[in-house]
Image (spheres, grey):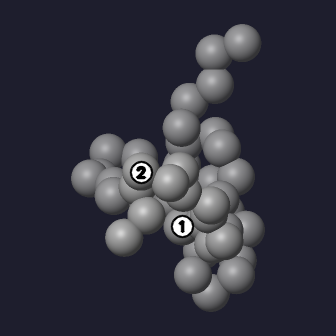
């Protein structure tokens, strides 16, 4: 299976489900935002 990042469904900040195809050829900054992450003890502030 050879999927492109442009084929992966993502959710916009407005909650809309889209693929990244509309942004192909442009510079993208992908940010993975995850809440309630339990960091290992050596990484806690």
Q: Say which of 32 and 1 sits in front.
A: 32
Q: Secondary structure at mark 2?
A: helix
**If the image is split into quadrants, where does the C terminus sit?**
bottom left
Whether residue 23 is visible, yes or no, is: no
Q: Which residue is mark 2?
A: 42
Q: Say which of 25 and 43 sits in front.
A: 43
Q: Position of residue 12 (x, y in %)?
A: 60, 74
Lateral position of residue 2 relative to residue 33, left or right: right
Q: Is 7 above or below relative to 16?
A: above
Q: Secondary structure at mark 1?
A: loop
- The residue at the far bottom in this view is 14
In the image, what residue occupies the spot 42% across and 51% down? 42
**Real-space Cα separation, disc 2 to disc 1, in angstroms:** 21 Å
The mark lying in front, picked from 2 and 1, is 2
**Does label 2 or label 1 sit earlier along the sequence?**
1
Whether residue 38 is visible, yes or no, is: yes
In the image, what residue occupies the spot 56% across and 30% down? 4
- The residue at the far top in this view is 1
**If the image is split into quadrants, where does the N terminus sit?**
top right
Q: Position of residue 11 (x, y in %)?
A: 66, 68
Q: Say which of 34 and 11 sits in front.
A: 34
Q: Position of residue 35 (x, y in %)?
A: 63, 72
Q: Which residue is mark 1?
A: 33
Total marks placed? 2
Lateral position of residue 26 relative to residue 7, left or right: left
Q: Is 4 above or below relative to 14?
A: above
In the image, what residue occupies the spot 54% across and 38% down? 5
* Labelled pair 2, 1 in contact (Cβ < 8 Å): no
In the image, what residue occupies the spot 26% across and 53% down? 27
Q: Badge 2: few (under 14), some or many (20 or more) residues near its Cα, within 10 Å? A: few
């Amino acid at each position: 299976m050879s999927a492109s990042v442009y084929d992966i469904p993502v959710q916009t900040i407005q909650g809309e489900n889209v693929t990244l195809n509309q942004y192909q050829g442009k510079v993208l900054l992908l940010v993975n935002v995850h809440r309630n992450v339990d960091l290992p003890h050596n990484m806690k502030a």
